[in-house]
Amino acid sequence: MDFLVKKFVKNYEQTNDTQVRTAYGMLASVVGILCNVFLFTAKILIGFVMGSIAVTADAFNNLSDAASSVISFVGVKMASKPADDEHPFGHGRMEYIAAFVVAFLVIQVGFSLFKTSIGKLRSPDEIVFDLVPFLILILSVGVKLWMAAYNKKLGKRIESKVMLATAADSMGDVITTSATILSILISYFAGINIDGIAGILVSLLVMWSGISIFKDTLEPLVGEAVDPVLYQQITEMVESYDGILGTHDLIVHNYGPGKSMASIHAEVPRNVDIEDSHEIIDRAEREVARKLGILLVIHMDPLAVEDEAVNRVRKEVEETLWLIDENLSFHDFRMVHGKKQINLIFDMVVPHSYSEEQKKKLTEKVGKAMNHKDPRYQCVITVDQSFIAPVPEEKTK
């Protein structure tokens, strides 16, 4: 696998470089085109010789994969175009759009094969067993396994959703060809023709593969939550600076693989000169851009860290939220003293799954709890929601 990368990708280790990512994508596309055209040619001949609709269905699945590789090739090339006046964030999302088209083609091919298989189920043809074509089918399983491993390895290396989806599609092809091989063996040894049934199963798996690719490429186009690992990287990097007390409200916008823009709120002491804090913020923005390749914009939130009374009440609010619901958190806390009341102003972060009614009840409950601690307390709460994706259960164990 690494032989092809070292041979055709210049500076292959610099995976954050746009030109290097493009070279990876083009290499994977060309390899996909050549392998799938070879498999299509071999299988269409085998299907003709053996009279098997399942083999023929599998052949056209490979042809659709070759067409998908062509579209991926074009998409990668278009995605590598630099930013211009009309597209200041570049053309990176063209890679997702190309994968979107690929998903549609795969689903369409699967549906066509499904209709053909239904016809064969009603009037099946006799399957002629031939050892050489049969061995070629087994060889095609090995080729697809290699393609799946190849695309998965390169996809992880350059963090390409499209290549990872292609790897999943190749694994689907392994399953469909294996089903075809099984139907031939059953027909030969048991004399039972399940070719139509196998064709239907193959077509369903092809359509499911297309739907999976569709889902994987639609998510970044619609807008995904911030990956927990990326969230931790950015927050830890920003909070590592002396003079930044904490962070919240991290938002990441994706404009294609390796092309992201982010914004975050950084809490700074209000009694520090604003120019000093601004210098720290600038350094943090530059470091994140250099190390993570993300254009980061940091908003400063001043905190009254020197005021013991504010710190005490902030702690009371924290304890109150935790007792009411351990899923709650807060930020941007301020105290405004009036003649007869003290306004406690803060943003309360709640999970996305909570309904509007739940949010309203929680707001009232927190307000009453703080008012019970001191009748002068009046909570002015803005309900907020996190942009961070939930951590998968297996990672929390």
Image (cartoon, rainbow, N blue to C red):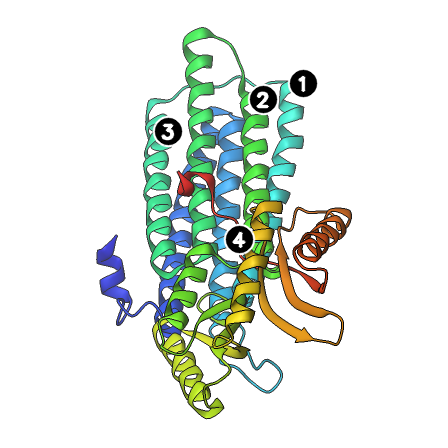
Mark 1 sits on what residue? 122
User: Are the residues at dot 1 and dot 4 in contact (C-beta closer than 8 Å)?
Assistant: no
**At x 46% / y 90%, what residue is drawn?**
273
Mark 4 sits on what residue? 389
* Residue 133, disc: 3
Identify the element where label 3 is drawn.
Answer: helix
Between 233 and 270, the one lying in front of the other is 270
Against 84, residue 68 (above or below) is above
User: Are the residues at dot 2 and dot 1 in contact (C-beta closer than 8 Å)?
Assistant: yes
Pointer 1 local density, CA inside 10 Å: few below 14, some 14–19, many at least 20: few
* Residue 321 visible: yes
Identify the element where label 1 is drawn.
Answer: helix
Task: Please name the amino acid that badge 3 sits on.
Answer: Pro
* Residue 196, disc: 2
Counting residues from the start of the chain, the first of labels 3 and 2 encountered is 3
Between 290 and 135, the one lying in front of the other is 290
Task: Please name the amino acid that badge 2 sits on.
Answer: Gly
